[in-house]
Each structure stands twice: as C-alpha cells, then as structure tokens.
C-alpha cells in the first residue's frame, strides 16, 4: 500500500474515534505495518495480512482504549503478540511507559526490531510466561494499568492481569462481541484476585460492523500471594 492511501485510511478511521494523527505518527505506523507484514512471512505474527485490515483491526482497534489512559502512566501489555495494543498506544501516546510481555522469543525479537526502527523510548520487552511475569517481584503490583487483547476468557484473564496492577490501578480487558456470560462467570475470580468490575464499554469500530467490548476492572485490594498460579494452571483450572 502506498503511503498516501495508508494516511487516508488512518485519518478516516481515526476521525471516527476522535483521534488525530500527525505526520510523524503516520510514518511510524506505516513503517510498523510494513515490518509486520515483512516479518509475518518468516514467523507467524498475525492472520490479518491485508493492509486495510491491519489499519482497522490492529491499529485503530488498539487505540480504542486510549481514552481510558491518564497521562504519564505505566502499562503492562500482557500476551502482546505482535505488539497490540502496546506499540500503537506508544506511537500515539509517547508519554506512556509500556512493557510488552510475551512468551515466544521470536515475537520478542520482532518487537525489539520495531522499537529500534521506530526509535521508541520508554518501552520495554519482557520474555516471560504470563504467570511468571505476575510472580516476578520486579513487576508484581507495580503498574497503573494492565491490558490484553484477544487473550483468554475473562476469568482466566483476570488471573493474568490483576496481580501486576497496583491497588488503585485498572485492568483494561479488550474483548470481542459478546462478553455477558464471561462477565457473569468471572465475578468470583475477580473478587478473589482483588478486583471489581467498574464498567463495560461496548462500541463498533468506525465505519464497520465489528463489535467490541472493553471491560474495565478496578484493583481495590492486594492480590493474594498464591496468584497467579503456576504456568498453565489458570487456563486448565479457572477460579470459581
């Protein structure tokens, strides 16, 4: 895709979310997209390979949580994969301090390449299983926000996200089109882990029929030390 078409699409979709890009940001997003598609031919980063879809379903979707983030805060992007939502947020919001967490070293290598090529500051990669990250004293209960996109159901996800958020912080859970059952099933687990659901933001991605939900969980008390449990256990034995 030529840059002029890319810029047109980014601005078109951005306007639908009250997001305005400057030329520097647009160039960074364009380079990011090209790196993503180039690396995707070597390692599996995304099944979304059409540039138009990358713009809407990766970049714009990632930025849908921007409105929930206060200035100069820290975020753990857990299970970030190819860098979503963390890298788009960093490009658009350089004030944020972001940690990209992933268990696969090949993806970490890609993320480091993106960070280097785009010359991003105050963004870090962590090669770790999610559960181990939550147990690590360097990170446990130290972030203002934690987030994840398309990672597990809400019961399991809360055991991944809540342990790394400080009391008074928030988990921002990016979900698909139907979360009613997940929300109901997760309430006990969220309470055990020190959280409470604040609200659910339901919206449609601009100029599309793609339904999204963002579940905001407040961290109201400390997470018991035994959580998260060992790697693999939360998904096999969800809290009830």
Image (cartoon, rainbow, N blue to C red):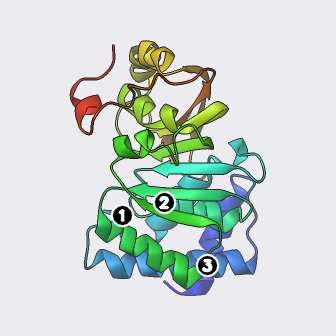
Residue marked by disc 2: 58
Q: Provide the secondary structure element on which disc 3 rests.
A: helix
Residue marked by disc 3: 28
Residue at the location (65% across, 58% down)?
Answer: 97
In the rendered structure, the answer to whether residue 155 lies left or right of residue 114 reads left
Q: Is residue 128 above or below residue 38?
A: above
Crowding at dot 3, Cα within 10 Å, few <14 / some 14-19 / many 20+, comes out as some
Q: Earlier in the sequence, mark 1 or mark 3?
A: 3
Q: Given contact means CB atoms under 8 Å apart, are the residues at marks 1 and 3 in contact?
A: no
- Where residue 51 sits in the image (x, y, percent)? 45, 73
In this view, the mark in front (1 or 3)? 3
Please identify the quadrant where the C terminus is shown.
top left
Q: Provide the secondary structure element on which disc 1 rests.
A: loop
Q: Is residue 88 above or below residue 37?
A: above
Residue at the location (65% across, 72% down)?
Answer: 121
> What is the CA distance from the residue labelled 1 to the residue labelled 2?
8 Å
Q: Given contact means CB atoms under 8 Å apart, are the residues at marks 1 and 2 in contact?
A: yes
> What is the CA distance from the residue labelled 1 to the residue labelled 3?
19 Å
Q: Earlier in the sequence, mark 1 or mark 2?
A: 1
Residue marked by disc 1: 48
Mark yes or no: residue 108 visible: yes
Q: Is residue 199 above or below residue 174?
A: above
Q: Nearer the viewer, residue 233 or 11?
A: 233
């Amino acid at each position: 895709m030529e840059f002029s078409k890319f810029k047109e699409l980014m601005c078109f979709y951005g306007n639908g979310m009250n997001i305005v890009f400057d030329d520097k940001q647009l160039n960074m997003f364009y380079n990011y997209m090209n790196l993503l598609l180039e690396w995707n031919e070597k390692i599996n980063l995304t099944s979304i390979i059409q540039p138009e879809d990358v713009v809407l379903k990766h970049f714009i979707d990632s930025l849908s949580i921007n409105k929930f983030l206060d200035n100069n805060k820290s975020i753990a992007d857990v299970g970030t994969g190819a860098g979503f939502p963390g890298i788009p947020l960093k490009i658009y919001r350089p004030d944020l301090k972001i940690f990209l967490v992933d268990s696969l070293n090949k993806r970490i290598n890609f993320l480091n390449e993106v960070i280097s090529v785009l010359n991003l500051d105050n963004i870090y990669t962590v090669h770790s299983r999610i559960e181990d990250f939550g147990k690590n004293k360097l990170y446990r209960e130290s972030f203002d926000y934690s987030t994840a996109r398309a990672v597990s159901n809400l019961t399991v996800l809360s055991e991944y996200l809540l342990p790394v958020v400080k009391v008074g912080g928030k988990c921002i859970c990016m979900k698909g089109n139907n979360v009613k059952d997940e929300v109901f099933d997760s309430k006990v687990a969220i309470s055990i882990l020190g959280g409470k659901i604040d609200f659910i933001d339901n919206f449609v991605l601009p100029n599309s029929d793609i339904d999204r939900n963002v579940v905001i969980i407040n961290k109201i008390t400390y997470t018991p030390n035994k959580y998260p449990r060992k790697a693999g256990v939360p998904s096999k034995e969800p809290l009830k």
